[in-house]
Image (cartoon, grey):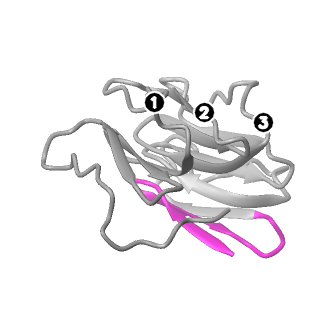
Amino acid sequence: MQIAGGTNHTLVLTKAGKVQGWGSNSSNQSKPPTTLSDVMQVAGGLDHSLALKRDGTVVAWGSNTFGQAAVPPTAFDVKQVSAGNQFSLVVQNDGTVFGWGRNDNSVYVISPEYTDIYTVAAGYANTILGLRNGRVIVIGDQSNGINVSRTPTRTATPTP
């Protein structure tokens, strides 16, 4: 149903809602919990992994050095997960986006002006926000010419 790549590991989501992983397992990031089921999305980070269950809850495993695998109790009614360099992000059904774990570059400090976030992508030292109006916003590390926050000239309006 879905594949996700971490830094040195791969995750797959089967039609049965189970997660399989392989590759580097130095922090148990490619070994999902055996009881994990009813999953609808997976995400791989540097040394941890995330699964979004159909009931809107999140399960994390792997390294927790920076708290990236310690899912906060406020992570419920989630519609998307994304895993970055030792940090995790979620988008809730009401459009709320938040993260936990390593935050060296303010990768999950989201300006209140962005209220129409539809999707997120966690990177190494930044986060990319996809807004419903088609805009793309980059927060976090802005080096290497990545600060491309703009409105594309031609884009479809994302829908849920």
Q: At x 72% / y 41%, what residue is drawn?
A: 94
Say if 71 sits above or below 129 in the image.
Answer: above
Question: What kind of residue is marked 2?
Answer: Ala
Q: Secondary structure at mark 1?
A: loop
Q: Residues at badges 1 and 3 in contact (C-beta under 8 Å)?
A: no
Q: Is residue 14 left or right of residue 102?
A: right
Residue 156 place in picture, x, y as percent: 48, 73
Q: Tell me if residue 58 is in the magenta stretch.
A: no
Q: Give how far apart the Cα atoms at labels 1 and 3 are.
A: 19 Å
Q: Quadrant of residue 75?
A: top right
Query: In the visual, does 157 lie left or right of 18?
Result: left
Task: Say whether residue 9 is magenta.
Answer: yes
Q: Earlier in the sequence, mark 1 or mark 3?
A: 3
| 10 Å crowding of disc 1: few (<14), some (14-19), many (20+) | some
Quadrant for residue 1, please give it.
Answer: bottom right
First-in-chain label (2 vs 1): 2
User: In the visual, does 127 lie left or right of 50?
Assistant: left
- Callout 1, which amino acid? Ile
> Which quadrant does the C terminus fall into?
bottom right
Under mark 3, the amino acid is Phe
Nearest the viewer among 73 and 133 is: 133
